[in-house]
Structure formats: C-alpha cells, structure tokens
Image (spheres, rainbow, N blue to C red):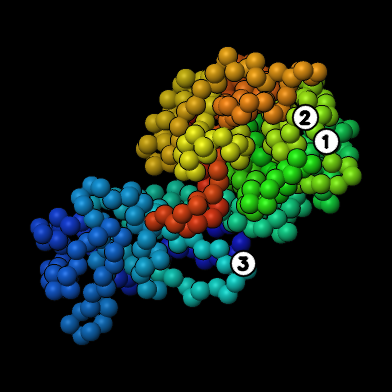
Amino acid sequence: MPPYSHIDRPSPFADMSGDTLPVWAVSRADIDRGHFDKTALAWAKSAGFKAAEGSVLLAPNRHGKLAGALFGLGDEGECHPFVGGKLARALPAGDWHIETSPIPGAVMALAFGMGAYRFETYRKALPDGPRLVIPADADAGAIRRTVAAVSLARDLVNTPANDMGPDALEAAFRGLAKHYKAKVSVVAGDDLLAKGFPMIHAVGRAAAQAPRLLELRWGKQGAPKLALVGKGVCFDTGGLDIKPSASMLNMKKDMGGAANVMALALMIMDAGLPVDLRVLVPAVENSISASAFRPGDVLTSRKGLTVQIDNTDAEGRLVLADTLTYACEDTPELLIDMATLTGAARVALGPDLPPFYTDDETLAGDLAAASGAVVDPLWRMPLYKPYEADVKARIADLTNAPSGGFAGSITAALFLKRFVTPRTCWAHFDIFAWSPKDKPHAPIGGEAQGIRALFDVISRRHPA
C-alpha cells in the first residue's frame, strides 16, 4: 500500500464490503431520457435539478433518510474529465459508490481521490469527508498509487520553507526510500566541493542549512536504467539579484521539481516496474549572506564548462547542470528532469500546460499521446538550435542568464542540454507545480504536473 503522503492522512477510498450509498452521475440529456433510478429521477424533476456541471442534489428515500445523490455533468460530453473530483468536497461524510455514470468509473474514482486532497497541517482539520468505493472493474492499485503520488507532490510543495528546507526535504526523501526499501546516499556541505559538485555548493552555501545532493537507488541492477532529476531549491530569494517581494511570496514551491520526481518515483516503485531507478535531487536554499555567490562570478561546473553568473536568480539551472552531468555518468536509458525553472514558460503556456523539451522523436510522440490519454496536459517546445548563441558568455563558456529576455524557457533548456551527454534519451519539463485556481480535482496550491503522463510512458515501455 503506498503512503498517502509524508503527512499522515486517511485514504479517500472505502472498502467494497460495507454499506454504501449510490451516486447517479447524469448529464442534462440523462434527466430528459430518464435512464437511471426512477425514484431519484422523480426527485430530481420535482426539485428542479438541471444537472449543471458539478452540482449535487441529495435524494431522500420515502422514510426521509438519505438514499443517494445526483451529480450533474452539464451538457453531454462537455464536462471536465475530472469533474468527479467535486464529489469529494460536496458529498456528506459516509461511504459512496458510483451507481451510474457516462464517465468511466476508474476516471471518476481517480478524480475523487485527487479532489479529496486537503492540506491542514497549520489549521484545525475539518471532519472526515466522504469515501468512495473503487469500482470492481478498475485497477485499484493504480488509482491508489496515483492519488498517493499526487498527494505527496502537493504536500511537499505546500509546506512552507521554514518546515521544508534542505534538512526536511532530505527527511521526506529518506522516508520515501525507507517505505520502498531503496538505498539513499547524500553529499552535503563542503563535501560537494570535494566530490565534484561545485555549482550546487555555490548556490546553496549562503543558507543556514547546508546544500546537498540526495540520491536514491532502487530496482535491479542490469535492468534498464532510469534517472530522474528534480530541482530542489527549497526557497529562492533570487540571491543578491533579489526578487521583489511579490515574486518571492510563492517561492516555497521552487522545489516543485524535486516534489514531482519523488512522486513519480513513488509510482514506479509501488508498481514494481522492472527498472534500475536512480533519483537525484540537488537540495539547496538560494539565500543572501556574506558567502552568497555574486553577479559576475564565473563558476566551473562538474563537467568542466565555465558559467558566467549574469543573474543569481537563474540558480536552478546551475544545480541541475551538475546533477545532470552526474546522472549521465551512469549512462541511463532514459533521463528525465523536472524543474520550476522559468517564468517564461508560464508567459508562453500559462500555469496549467507545462512545456517539455526533447530531441528524441519517439519519446516526444509517446509523451504527447500519454498526455492526452491520461488527461495530464503537456506541450512540446523546441530546442531551437539558432538560440544556442544566446547561451554563450563573454568571458566564460556559458551564461546562466542570456540578455534580451526572449525565449527564456528555450534558452534555459538549451543551457541544460550542454550538460547532457550527446545521444542520451533526455526530456526536460519546465513545470509550475502550482494550481492558481480551484479545479474539480485540485484545490489552489501545490500540484503534480506531468508525472501521470510520464508514468504511463515508462510503464508501457517497462511493464511490471
């Protein structure tokens, strides 16, 4: 059974064995056709229920007790695929099952599980909500692990930096590894210099908590090698090129890449996929003190390339560069990195549609297909070769912050590409890791992005 997060919380799912109440999920057309429980239909019509998307009407029995609930899907075929997430916040406490629905029961259950998420660490918890029975014809294990992974990513991102610095991120990393009997190693503080991670050290050395590289190994040696790299900047002040206060307000989420690769690793390990898994997280805080790295500094990377620091707020690509170099030394069959890397990606595609970059056409096609199949939005952006000139620096091999402000997400991806061994099957995801608006399946706050599509691709390539 997967852990539902690093925060102890009950499962949103009920056992099939107990007594449960029915949910009739209906479109406006279903009300007209009447193809469901006749008593519930009569109640819906007498109450003026129009089946507006996400609406709930509780139905009594003839004794005045709760008999079930009608759930509106709006116009036929036009509702949000995960509209079922609203049930988790609209139904009264108790155990429920989906009696009728044009949306597959497995999708409704997954939406319910994701929609049931609540982050209550810092306030009085609400009473327990409803629970849903996973339909017998659905893959309960897949639904449970997906909900657990999404909850883990959200919890890690939602936790503020005073409780989710590098020390706490390491503790969560170790906790995940312990649950699945994975091995963990950590290189921290000045040992980063001794062991060849100078840019991770430079970015994190000004913080009270030491910078570190977290490494998890799981699986069977000799199996296909899969490497996951996640940006773990636990808070980003911008460094000496300090952010304005409004831009700093949400920077607890700058470790969203780490949160998402940890969540993806949970899915892979819980499913028992036949891979040799390696998860790498450079965990740092980009702070300001006398030892902070400066604009104009030139850093030498693990790969030997020199990097001119033209903006200390472009720190994520620095810690990723050393980590990607290290990941490639093990010649992985597939290398994935995830990072809350650029505001330019949000300007281009908004908060809900993360771009990804890869030169591997097969991988690009698989990701695009999986994105649509599992309703996990992704959009491929180009590694546009002519823009490589923008990443060149005046007195070093590379700049970490090209001037001009154009194509910022693309130039960041091109920077990272310089640290990936040629012909490596690699994809970079520039995620937001945050939902700025309530969705049926996701409240405002930390969010998992891309991991369900990635798991679909990986599990199809390496079925358990």
- Helix or strand or loop: what does disc 1 sit on? loop
Q: Which residue is mark 3?
A: 121
Report the residue that reaches farthest toward the left.
33
Q: Is residue 130 above or below residue 216?
A: below
Q: Residues within 10 Å of mark 3 (few under 14, many from 20)?
A: few
Q: Residues within 10 Å of mark 2 (few under 14, many from 20)?
A: many
Nearest-to-viewer mark from 2 and 3: 2
Along the viewing direction, whichever of 190 and 267 lies nearer the viewer: 190
Q: Nearer the viewer, mark 1 or mark 3?
A: 1
Residue holding disc 1: 294
Q: Residue 309's mark?
A: 2
Please say whether residue 279 is visible from this viewpoint. no
Identify the residue at horizontal 76%, vertical 46% (top origin).
285
* Sequence order check, earlier mark of 1 and 2: 1
Look at the picture and state if 15 lies above or below 58.
above
How far apart are the two marked residues, 1 and 2, measured between alpha carbons?
Answer: 7 Å
